[in-house]
C-alpha cells in the first residue's frame, strides 16, 4: 500500500489541491468541470434556435423570438439559417414597434444581400417603418416623406411585386397626410394674419397634391384670401387625428 502511494504520490497531491480549491473557485469551478467533461451543458443547436425563434414569432412573442435569432447569429453566423435569422430579427423588432431600429436592420439586410428573393418584402417593410411613425398632421412630416420615397423605390425596382397595390395605397395615404399638413400650416398662418404665407402654402398644396381629400377646401380658402375675404373660422374642427386605413384608399387602376 505504501509503495502504491509513493508511486502515485504526485497524482494524489494534485487531486487533494484540486478538491481543496473547489470551494474558492466560484463560477470557475463549473467551467473547469465542464472542461473535464463533467456536468457540461450542451448549447442549443442552430436548428433548435431557428425552430424556437420561429415558434415564438408565430405566437407573437417577438421579444423572445428576437433573442433566439440574435443568439443564432452570434453562435452560428455562417449557418444556413443566418439569412432567416437576420430577417426575423428585423421583423421581430418591427412588431415590437421599435421602428427606428427596425429600419436600420432592414436597410442592412438589403445592403448585405441585394439579390436575395426577400428584397421586395424588405423594401416594403422599410417603408412601413416610416409609415407607422407618421403622427398627427400638426407634427413633423418627415416620416411621411420617407415612407413615400421608400414605397416609390420599391415600385421602381419591382413594379410587378405582390406588394404593388399596398405600396400604392400607402403612398396615397401618406400624400394625403402631407396635403393635410400643408393645409394645417396654411390655416394657422391665415388665423394669425400671415396671409401671404398662407396663400403660398395653399398654392403649393394644390400644385403638389391636387388629388388629396383636402384640396377642395384648400381651393376655397385660397380664393377667399385672394379676394381679401379671409373666413375667420375655427381651424381645428376638421383636423383628422390619424391616417385612414390603407384598405379604404384603393388606388384607381
Image (cartoon, rainbow, N blue to C red):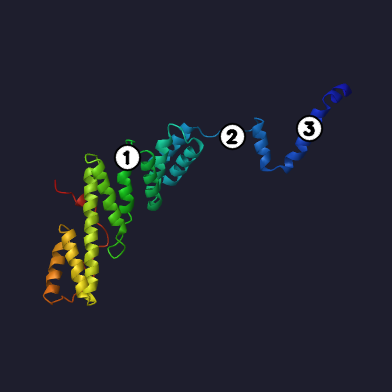
Query: For the C terminus, which image quadrant?
Result: top left
Q: Position of residue 103 (x, y in %)?
A: 37, 49
Q: Of label 1 and label 3, which has the lower sequence position? A: 3
Query: For the N terminus, which image quadrant?
Result: top right
Which dot, 1 or 3, sits closer to the camera? 1
- Specify few, some or many for label 1: CA neighbours under 10 Å numbering under 14, 14-19, or 20 or more: many
Q: Of label 3 and label 2, which has the lower sequence position? A: 3
- Specify few, some or many for label 3: CA neighbours under 10 Å numbering under 14, 14-19, or 20 or more: few
Q: Is residue 171 left or right of residue 219?
A: right
- The image shows residue 64, relative to residue 1, as above or below, that is below
Q: Which mark is residue 14?
A: 3
Nearest to the observer: residue 238 or residue 225: 225
Picture residue at 81% right of the left edge, 32% below the top: 13
- The image shows residue 14, relative to residue 207, as above or below, that is above
Q: Which mark is residue 41?
A: 2
Q: Is residue 143 left or right of residue 65?
A: left
Q: Of label 1 and label 2, which has the lower sequence position? A: 2
Q: Is residue 249 left or right of residue 55?
A: left
Query: Quarter-wise, where is residue 223 in the image?
Result: bottom left
Spatial separation of the CA atoms under disc 1 and disc 2? 38 Å
Which dot, 3 or 2, sits closer to the camera? 3
Amino acid at each position: 500500500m505504501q509503495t502504491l502511494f509513493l508511486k502515485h504520490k504526485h497524482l494524489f497531491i494534485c487531486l487533494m489541491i484540486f478538491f481543496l480549491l473547489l470551494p474558492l473557485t466560484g463560477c470557475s469551478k463549473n467551467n473547469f468541470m465542464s472542461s473535464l467533461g463533467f456536468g457540461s451543458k450542451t448549447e442549443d443547436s442552430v436548428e433548435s434556435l431557428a425552430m424556437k425563434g420561429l415558434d415564438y414569432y408565430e405566437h407573437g412573442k417577438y421579444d423572445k423570438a428576437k433573442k433566439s435569432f440574435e443568439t443564432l447569429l452570434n453562435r452560428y453566423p455562417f449557418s444556413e439559417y443566418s439569412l432567416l435569422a437576420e430577417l426575423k430579427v428585423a421583423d421581430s423588432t418591427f412588431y415590437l414597434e421599435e421602428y427606428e431600429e427596425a429600419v436600420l436592420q432592414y436597410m442592412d439586410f438589403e445592403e448585405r444581400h441585394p439579390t436575395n428573393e426577400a428584397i421586395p418584402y424588405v423594401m416594403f417593410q422599410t417603408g412601413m417603418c416610416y409609415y407607422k411613425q407618421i403622427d398627427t398632421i400638426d407634427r413633423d412630416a418627415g416620416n411621411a416623406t420617407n415612407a413615400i420615397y421608400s414605397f416609390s423605390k420599391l415600385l421602381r425596382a419591382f413594379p410587378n411585386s405582390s406588394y404593388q397595390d399596398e405600396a400604392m395605397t400607402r403612398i396615397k395615404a401618406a400624400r394625403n397626410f402631407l396635403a393635410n399638413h400643408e393645409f394645417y400650416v396654411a390655416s394657422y398662418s391665415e388665423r394669425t394674419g400671415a396671409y401671404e404665407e398662407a396663400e403660398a402654402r395653399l398654392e403649393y398644396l394644390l400644385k403638389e397634391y391636387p388629388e388629396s381629400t383636402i384640396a377642395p377646401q384648400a381651393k376655397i380658402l385660397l380664393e377667399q384670401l385672394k379676394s381679401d375675404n379671409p373666413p375667420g373660422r375655427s381651424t381645428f374642427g376638421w383636423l383628422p387625428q390619424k391616417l385612414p386605413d390603407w384598405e379604404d384608399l384603393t388606388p384607381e387602376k
